[in-house]
Structures are given as structure tokens and as C-alpha cells.
Amino acid sequence: MKEFIIYTAFLLLIMLAGGCRNDFGELNAPPDKITEPQLNQLFTEALVQMYPHDYMEWFYNYSQYYLPWSQATVAVGGNRADMNMVGDWSPQENKLFGPKLQIEEIRYRLNEVYTPEQAAPYQYLKAICNPILVYLGLYGTDSYGSMAYSEASKSPYTSPRIITPKYESQQELFDVWLRELDETIYALTHPVTVGGKEYQQLSPGRQDFIYGGDYAKWARLANSLKLRIAVRMIYSDLGRALEIAKEVAKSPAGIMDGLEYDFIYNRGSDFNGFGNPVENLGIGSQSLIGFLVKNKDPRVRFLFAKNDFNSGVIQAFFDAGREVPGYILDQVEYTEEMDGKHFTGWKFPGEPWVRYYGAPVDIQAGKDPAVNAAYFNRENFKLTNSERTKNYQPLSLYNEEMVRGGSTYTFPSAPGNVAIQDNLSQPLYTALFSSAETALYLAELSLLGAQLPMSAEGYYRQGIELSVKLYDRLAMLNKIPYYRQHDGFDPLDETIALKTDEIAPLIEKYSLTGNNGNKLEQVFIQQYIHLLGLPNELMVTVRRSGYPRRGSALIGWEAFDSSDSSYPIPRRLPISSLNATDQMRDIKQASYRRQNLTPGANTPRTLADERLYYDLYAPAYGMGGH
């Protein structure tokens, strides 16, 4: 028997080997028959690998750290005492190196392999590689400071090979990135000539799935991206930050100032952003959700999900003799008859606003029996009939379908009703950078003293309008639940798509008022709201600005621990302990020593006290003010 098994396995190996020879014969071609990837293909691959917000980022960095630390969300079940502890995390600087390999190959071919005449038609293509790397470089340095950049991924193209690239300080990196963006702007706003001949630039066309090969839009992106660097410098070099804003405003490249310039990322019909669902992206915080609903800000409908308490579910709770959470019941019109309570309608402001509620951020909140019962005790939000038990969420979850494609949503209904689902195989569309972000940065820098063509209020109003329209566009593209009418709707449900008459009243409610400090706070709050879709940028804004602010009449910063005023919240992610066998050990150690950072240290107090360069002189959390 043993010999038979061995013989059979041997025959299978022969058959597989034969199959491989047939299937891969074309791949095993002589070297002179191999076709190298085209420059456009290398560029596309860099774009494909550019997306930084993968599953690990959402599962660890965003849902467990950045969103709750920014007081945007609260953990389902309430914030825990150890919410300031960093367990596992995703190292953000690693997102740079895949795209950089593709781009270094493009640079090598154009600089070293092609003749000047052969390289000339590709100079614009080479130039638009810079914003990709700057974007990812900023993303990496935000939580780690110094990193390998200029010499990174150059090993195949150097002699002797660079296998231990230098670490550059955050201050040096800002200079490098500003220079690279300026190089891109210059290249894309000037003709390319070699030997007195002007060369038309070849376009990647649809292989550029962001702008379709429109180099003018890439120039606007590169120019506007400088503002992400400028606002990170306001406490380390304000004069330079204001000068950058002035340069951006007068650049011939123009700025991103319309939805058509937004950097909308979708790399194909099978792109979901990340694969497996993240079960707990968090509940919106009470102060944030309350502020958005109070001002009838449409963005609450896109960034957060309706709760499960529609009219049918509320009636089912009435019929079962179960309590409806008080903050929901306060919005319900009902009658009390001999046979019980009967839902008759919603109080002002009605659907959809009455479906959005947040949770308190205080880690002590759940210890209060009344608060725990109303917000966190899942047993209070269940209904059971003879067939099954259904769970209902009374609060508004961070909307997963805005950050992950392919999600399935089950519309809430009473036990016994047929479950109706929204299960379209929908790819993800997301904005990595936008005109709204650009305008709100310009509003901030104008208030700080930058000489710009428009007033701070002009940029501010433009930023709000563009932000609302962008989130509406993303909600439409992502086909999120309730955006359009659906068979699963409760009869009293309203759609959440942007209405034509919503923006103007919203801007008036948010009008800049008061002294310069008051106006800055209002700008920072709008940045905070807009960047809820980009948790890394949200965390950067909260950290560098000190807003939301304690005691504010807008969105106020609250104590994470009402029993301990010194409860520390980290300002960066940990740095792994240095490995004795790591060839980069000495370079890393010297870099961390210069920054006064402790590798391997992972206590909340250390991560709160050891700050990065651009964060050294920023206000403490909740203590914003210039």
C-alpha cells in the first residue's frame, strides 16, 4: 500500500510538471524576448500600491487609537480604562516603500537608460510621481518622526548598493518634500525641450485612474499638498508656513478648488479598501453627533449610520413592553391606549435627524447604572419572539460603507419580519485629498497672517460647501444605505441624500464670528469634521491644534477619565525595540536619540510626553488657542 501511494504521488508530480511546462512555456522565454513593463504600467502599479488605509490600519490604528483618541468615536460597549494603551499597531512608514520601488524604476530608466530624446516625452509622468511619495512620506512620519526616504528603495540602482539608507529628520523631510512638490509644479507648468526641440508629453490615459492623465490636475494636487506640510509647521516655523501659503496661492499651477480636482481613489470594480469587516469602528461621540444634528449638518448622515430604532422597531419595543432609551423616546410621538403604546410619528426635526445619537467618551460613564442601561447594555436592546432574537443598535456607528466596499447592510425590522438586505457588490470610492481640505487650510493660514487672494471667511465658506458636496458624492458613489429609496425602508424613513436647500443655511449657521481666536476655533472644528473620513489627518489636526477645546460652546473636549485629570493620551505610536541583528540598528538608534524618543517604550505617559518635531510646541489635547 505504501509503495502504491508513493507511485501515485510520483505520477501526479510528472503530470503537474508537464502541465507547468505547457502553461508557463511563454514565461520561460529567452532574455531577448522578454518585454519590460512600460513606464505607464510602473506608474499604475505605484498608484495601486499607494492606498494606505488597509485592514490593519482600520483594525488597529484607526478604530482603536486615532478615532477614539480624537473623541470622534467611542468603543461599542463604552471606552475602557485601557483605551490609552497601544497593543498591536500598523507601522505607517511601511506604506511608502512599495510605491517607491516602482517610482525609482521609472526614474532610473529615464535618467540612466533612456537617451535624453527618448526620456523627453515622459518628463510629466516622472514629475507626477513626486506627489505620491510625498503623500505617503507625510503619512509615515506623522507617528514616527525621522524615517528613511531619499535613499530608500534605491538598492537596485546604486553602486555600491545602498542597503542601509540614511534616516532624515522630520524637519529635513519637510524641506525635501516641499522641494519635490515645487519640482513637480515647475515641470508641469513648463514645456519640455531637448536640443531646442519641444516634446509633447505622453499621457498615461486611463492607466492613471485618479485624473485620467490630466497633468493640470496633478499640478493642482502638488501645489495644494504643500499646505499639508505648511499647517504641520505652524508651531515650529510659522513664518515659513505663511510663506508656503502665499506661494501656493500665487502659483501658476492653481489650487484644488472644485470637486473635479478631488483625489478620488478607486482602482477598479473589485477594490474594497480592505477585505474583512472591522466589527467595531466605533460609535460617534455624544458631543460630535449632537453638534452635527443640532446644526442639521448633512455630513452626519454620510459619516455615521442611522441607528436601528425606526418606527417599526420602536412599535415592536412598545408591543413587547420593553423600554425604549429615553433620548430616543423623547423624539417620539405616541399614544397610550388600553392595549399599550402606539407610535404616531416623530417630533421635530423628524427623520432622518432623529436617528443619530452618540455615546459619552468618559471611561467612567459605563459605571453609572443609568448611563450603562441607556447606552451600553446590549441586553436592553434585544427583542425575542418564538423564532429568533434580534439585536438593535440605538446609537450611530461610524459608517463602514464609506470606508469599505462590498459590505452588506440589513435593514432593521421587528422579530418575525423578513430580513431585507442591501448587499450590492459595491467597490469603494474614497477621497485621499480634497479641495475642501485645501480651502480649510487656507482659511486657517489666512487667520494666522498669510497674505492670500481671498479672505479667511471666503476660504472657510468654500471649504464647508465643498466638504458637504464631497461627502454627498462619496455616499452616492458608495451607495450607502438610505442614500436612495430602498425596499427595506421603514414607511417613515427618509433618504439621506443631500437636499438642494441644505448648504446655504448650514454655512450661515457656521458663520465666522468673534475675535481671531474664535474664528480659528471655528475653522479647526470644520477641519475636524471634514477629516473624520481620514483618521490619520484627523489625529494630526487634533494633536497640532489643541481643538476641540475644553469648555467650548461648539464641540467641547471632554475628560476621558472624570476621576483622573492626568489620564494620558498618546501623541504618537510606539517605536519597536531595536534588534541587535538589524543592519539599520545604528542608524535608527542615532535617529531616535536625536529626537529624544525611546524605542520599545509603550506606556501612555511616554507616548504622551515624547513628542515629534512638528508636535513639540503644540498645545495639549483640548487646550487650543494661539
Image (tube, grey):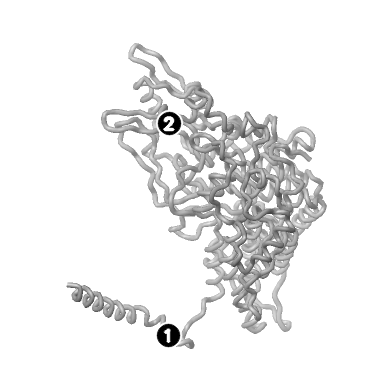
Tell me, yes or no, if residue 492 can be seen here: no
Please tell me which residue lies in front, 204 or 568: 568
Q: Earlier in the sequence, mark 1 or mark 2?
A: 1
* Left or right of 26 in this view: 99: right
Q: What residue did someone put label 2 on?
A: 378
Quadrant that contains the N terminus: bottom left
| Mark 2 crowd level (few <14, some 14–19, many ≥20, 10 Å Cα) | some
Q: Residue at x 63, y 44 (%)?
A: 604
* The image quarter in which residue 97 lies: bottom right
Tell me, yes or no, if residue 484 can be seen here: yes
Quadrant that contains the C terminus: top right
Q: In the structure shown, which secondary structural element does the residue marked by tag 1 occupy?
A: loop
Q: Residue at x 46, y 20 (%)?
A: 333
Residue 108 rendering spot, x and y as whole percentages: 63, 77
Please tell me which residue lies in front, 151 or 215: 151
- The single residue placed furthest to the front in the displayed view is 580
Please tell me which residue lies in front, 497 or 356: 356
Please tell me which residue lies in front, 446 or 476: 446
The three-letter amino acid code for the residue at tag 1 is Ala
* Mark carried by residue 174: none
* Mark carried by residue 29: 1
Q: How many marks?
A: 2
Q: Residue at x 50, y 23 (%)?
A: 369
